[in-house]
Image (spheres, rainbow, N blue to C red):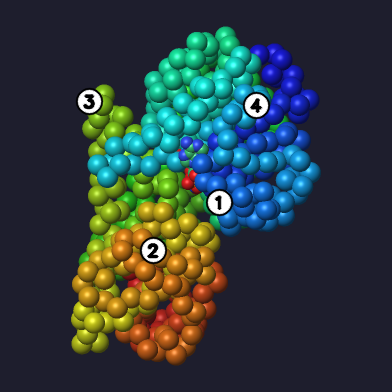
Amino acid sequence: MQELIDKIERRAARCGVIGLGYVGLPLALEFSRVGFRVVGIDLDEGKVQAIRDGRSYIVDVSDEEIARPVREGKFSATTDFSVISELDTINICVPTPLRKTKDPDLTYVVSAVNEIRKYLRPGQLVILESTTYPGTTEEVVRPALEASGLEVGQDFCLAFSPERIDPGNPNFGTRNIPKVVGGVTARCTEVAQHLYEASVDTVVPVSSTQVAEMVKLLENTFRSVNIGLVNEIALMCSALKINVWEVIEAAKTKPFGFMAFYPGPGLGGHCIPIDPFYLSWKAKMNGFDARFIELAGHINESMPRFVVERITDALNQHRKSIRGSRIHVLGVAYKAGVNDIRESPALNVMKILADKGAVLSYTDPYIPVVREEGFELDSVPLEAARMKAVDCVVILIAHREIDYDLVVRSAPLVVDTRNALQGCDAPNVIRL
Ligand SMILES: NC(=O)c1ccc[n+]([C@@H]2O[C@H](COP(=O)([O-])OP(=O)(O)OC[C@H]3O[C@@H](n4cnc5c(N)ncnc54)[C@H](O)[C@@H]3O)[C@@H](O)[C@H]2O)c1
């Protein structure tokens, strides 16, 4: 393994990244930025072609950031897994969704690992980055790779390093988010640490793959539970007729012991609504009941219905029902500033409204079309005439590009679930 460390130090190692999505593409570019030759492998021919053409499909990555290393021969993309035999390091960044039953779906990880096994050779380093339950690297990845006849720690290295990227965050990216890494053996940790130290500002080694896996789940469970708590406080404030947003703004002036979380229409994205259930599933398999996770999930999942209740009450004040009302949604992405609609709570709110007979339209500068949950909607431009013509506008995601003054001036009724209209006391505005 010393040979691999030397290659990494000389930037002569050839790096591979499997799965070129929100996590894998920025990671691959970071490796190439510091001088490694990088190959990205993805099943999606569209993404591979986009990379070859120097076209980005991720908001945080510019076309030029892809085009330059591709031009310079430092970065290439393929759908052909046989390139693995030429690689020194392989990072796995494939999806880890939940099944409908909320059980972990490791299909993508297993399929990627099975491809690696076919081409695995002595001297390689394999790192799983996909978020998963503690034990996955040891119990699922290790036996699959060792079925090749090679032994971990002896012939090849295996580690887990959770990805912590926050899409749309202008301050933190792959380079300056500290990277936690835990190997199957101490040598595995050391080799993986060398790879990340080449491209990431801070590397945090831990004693095992299970600890590294658990770190990520603690982080995301912390978010899910705190969002669940603040959502419950919002429901409570609504019953007590207190402005929850004002409460949070004042509470966050405390310089210690408090961290602001905000209520909203529910959790979205590929991480927070999903990852804690990986942990509760594993806990359950070991006879442990993860009560906080289940309770937070329950509250967060109830928020779309609460938002619809607010819209119903608001329309009721105008002697209108949901059925037949024209309701315009602002923001359908799962959070502000991203072009990702996975698990977006906006879809749940829209589904409930559509089932009740609302006539829906939407504006989202990041999501031009919605073809999910039976919807066939295209984003429409935000115009005063359109705002005047609807019965209610509901702000589900507070994209910065939206002209909120125009919305408040023109729409008869605005339900704001994100405090996008902070400070505005217009009589047509109803807050969560
Ligand atoms: N998106 C985030 O903000 C974020 C943050 C931290 C961690 N994560 C975790 O990182 C992992 C990846 O998430 P993502 O958001 O990048 O997903 P993504 O869907 O954006 O990208 C995954 C890519 O993997 C490809 N893929 C699927 N199966 C494959 C296979 N067998 N071989 C090769 N390619 C395959 C898909 O085509 C896709 O391009 C997940 O475990 C997720 O929980 C995501």
Label 2 secondary element? loop
On the image, the x and y values in percent for residue 317 come to 23, 84
Disc 2 versus disc 4: distance between alpha carbons? 38 Å
- Which label's residue is closer to the chain start, 4 or 1? 1
Q: Amino acid at mark 4?
A: Leu
Label 4 secondary element? loop
Disc 3 versus disc 2: distance between alpha carbons? 40 Å
Is the residue under label 4 in contact with that under label 2 (CB below 8 Å)?
no
Residue of label 4: 87
Q: Residues within 10 Å of mark 4 (few under 14, many from 20)?
A: many
Residue of label 1: 46
Disc 1 versus disc 2: distance between alpha carbons? 18 Å
Residue of label 2: 371
Label 1 secondary element? helix
Between 152 and 176, the one lying in front of the other is 152
For the C terminus, give its image quadrant: bottom left
- Which label's residue is closer to the chain start, 3 or 2? 3
In the displayed structure, 99 sits above or below 284; it is below
